[in-house]
Image (spheres, helix red, strand yellow):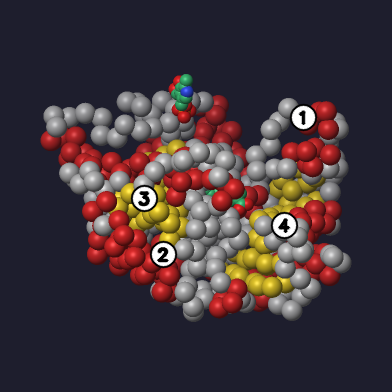
Amino acid sequence: MDPKAAAIDFDSSPNNLEAFWMPFTWNRRFKQHPLLLASAKDMHYTSVDGRPILDGTAGLWCCNAGHGRQKIVEAVQQAVARLDFAPTFQLGHPLVFELASRLTNLVPGNFDHVFFCNSGSEAVDSALKIALAYHRMRGDAARTRLIGRERGYHGVGFGGISVGGIVKNRMFFGPLINGVDHLPHTHSLEHNAFSRGQPDWGLHLADELERLVALHDASTIAAVIVEPVAGSTGVLVPPVGYLQRLREICDKHGILLIFDEVITGFGRLGKGFATEYFGVEPDLITCAKGLTSGTIPMGAVICRKGIYETFIDAADSSGGTIELFHGYTYTGHPVAAAAGLATLEVYKEEGLFDRAAELSGYWEDAMHSFKGEKHVIDVRNIGMVGAIELEPRPGKPTERAYDAFVKCFEKGLMIRVTGDIIALSPPLIIEKAQIDEIVDTLRDVLQHLD
Ligand code: PXG
Ligand code: PLP
C-alpha cells in the first residue's frame, strides 16, 4: 500500500457533486450515496475516506500494469514538461512514430500501420471509416454495409452504437447510421453455463454471417466488427472455432474483419492481443485502455498490411493528395505517446502478458469456485477475465448485482457490474493472495445478499 494514501478533505454533499453529469451512471442515486476515489498505487485504490480498495477491474478494464507505476508516471511528467502538445496534421514529433513502430512489432503477423486517436470509441469510428474508404479506394464503392453483433459494445460514437448491440445505448439516439446488420450473440446459459474457457457449443452461430451475406449480397458489405471476447455485456467467450469461421467467411466474400480489442488488447488474455491468443488475423484491430495502462487517454487502429498502401496508391494515382480525410486534434498526442511507450516498456520488462497467462489457471479455478454459490447461475472465464452471472431479483433486474457492487466497495473490493453480471479483470500484476482476497470478499458478500 502507498504509505501516502490517506483520507482527503472533500465536501461530498450532493450540492458539491451536482455539476458533473456522470457517464453511464444513475446520477440521482450516486450523488446521494457517492463512492469516491482519492488515489491509487499498484493493486489498490484509496477511497476519499482513506480506505484501501483492492482493484478487481483494472479501473475500467484499462490499468493492466497496475496503478501509479513509477516508469509511466515519470515518462508522462517529462513528456508534458518537454513538449506539451504538437500537431500531427502535416507535422509530427518523434514519440508517436516510435510508438507506432513498437505497436506493429507487438502484434504478430502482417500488421504494419497504426492510426492514433483518444479512446476506444474513436478507434472504432476510425476503423469503420477506414474500412469504408478502403473499399472505395479500391474501386469497390458499393461495399458500404457494416455488420456488428448483438450484445456487442463498440463505444458510444454513432458508428460504434450502430454496430453495437446494446438496446439502451441505441434506442434514445434516432435512426443511427443506416445499412447496418447484426450477427446473433453467442451467450447461452442453456448450452454453455459454467464452461471453463471457450464453450464447445455455438460455432454454428458464425454461419449466420453467411445468411446475412445471402440477404444483402457480399458486394454491399464492407466489414464485420466483433469483440473477440465481448467484455462490456458480461464476458461472452467465443465458442471454439467461432472466430476462425468468421475469418473464413469474410475471406470468401472479400469482407474486412475488425477485431475490437479495446478490452482484450495488452495482455488481458495472456497474449499481447486476442488475435495471437486465438490465432485468427483480422484486417483491423481497435485498441485503447491498456495501451497506456489507463494513464492518459489514447486509442489506436492497427492495420493489416495492404490497407495503408491502398490509400497511398489511390492518392498517388489521382495526382497526390491527403490520403485519409480523418484525424483528431489529439491524434498521437505527445504525452499520451510517452505514456504508451513507457507502458509497453513496463509490460515487457515485467513480462506481464506471460504473467497473465501463468496466472490464468489459478484465476479460472478461483472463478469457478463460485459454482453452487448463492444466486450464481453461470461462471465464465478466459485469460485474466471472469464473470459471475447472478439470478436477477424477480421484477428488479440489475439490483442484486448493484447491491453486490456497493457491498464489495464497502468491504474494500472494486468489482464491475453490468446487468446482473459481475465482471472481474484485475491488473496483471495481481498476486495469488490477492486473487484469494477477491474471492473471499465476493463470496462473503454473495452469501449475505438477498
Ligand atoms: N470497444 C470495446 C470492445 C470496449 O470495451 C470501447 C470500444 C469504447 O472505449 P472508450 O475508451 O471510448 O470507452 C470499449 C470500452 C464496462 C465498460 O464496464 C467497458 C468499456 C468502457 C466503460 C465501461 O464494461 N469499454
Ligand atoms: N469542433 C470544433 C469547433 C473544432 O474546431 C474541432 C477541432 O478543431 C472539433 C470540434 C474536433 O475536435 P477534436 O479534433 O479534438 O476531435
Residue depicted at x 17% and y 44%: 139
Q: Which of marks 2 and 1 is in front?
A: 1
Within 10 Å of disc 2 (Cα), the crowding (few <14, some 14-19, many 20+) is some
Q: Nearer the viewer, mark 1 or mark 3?
A: 3
Residue depicted at x 36% and y 27%: 89
Q: Quadrant of residue 224?
A: bottom left
SS label for mark 2: helix
Label 3 lies in ligand 1 vicinity (Cβ under 8 Å): no
Q: Distance between the residues labelled 4 and 2?
A: 34 Å
Q: How far apart are marks 2 and 3 (CA)?
A: 24 Å
- Say if residue 176 shows up in the picture: yes
Q: Which of 240 and 348 is in front in this view?
A: 240
Q: Which of marks 2 and 3 is in front?
A: 3
Three-letter residue code for mark 2: Glu
- Residue 146, numbered circle: 3
When the figure is inspected, residue 129 is found, relative to residue 191, above or below; the finding is above
Q: Earlier in the sequence, mark 4 or mark 1?
A: 1
SS label for mark 1: loop
Q: Mark 4 points at which residue?
A: 398
Within 10 Å of disc 3 (Cα), the crowding (few <14, some 14-19, many 20+) is many
Three-letter residue code for mark 4: Thr
Q: Earlier in the sequence, mark 2 or mark 1?
A: 1
When the figure is inspected, residue 81 is found, relative to residue 220, above or below; the finding is above
Q: Mark 2 points at which residue?
A: 276
Q: Which of marks 4 and 2 is in front?
A: 4
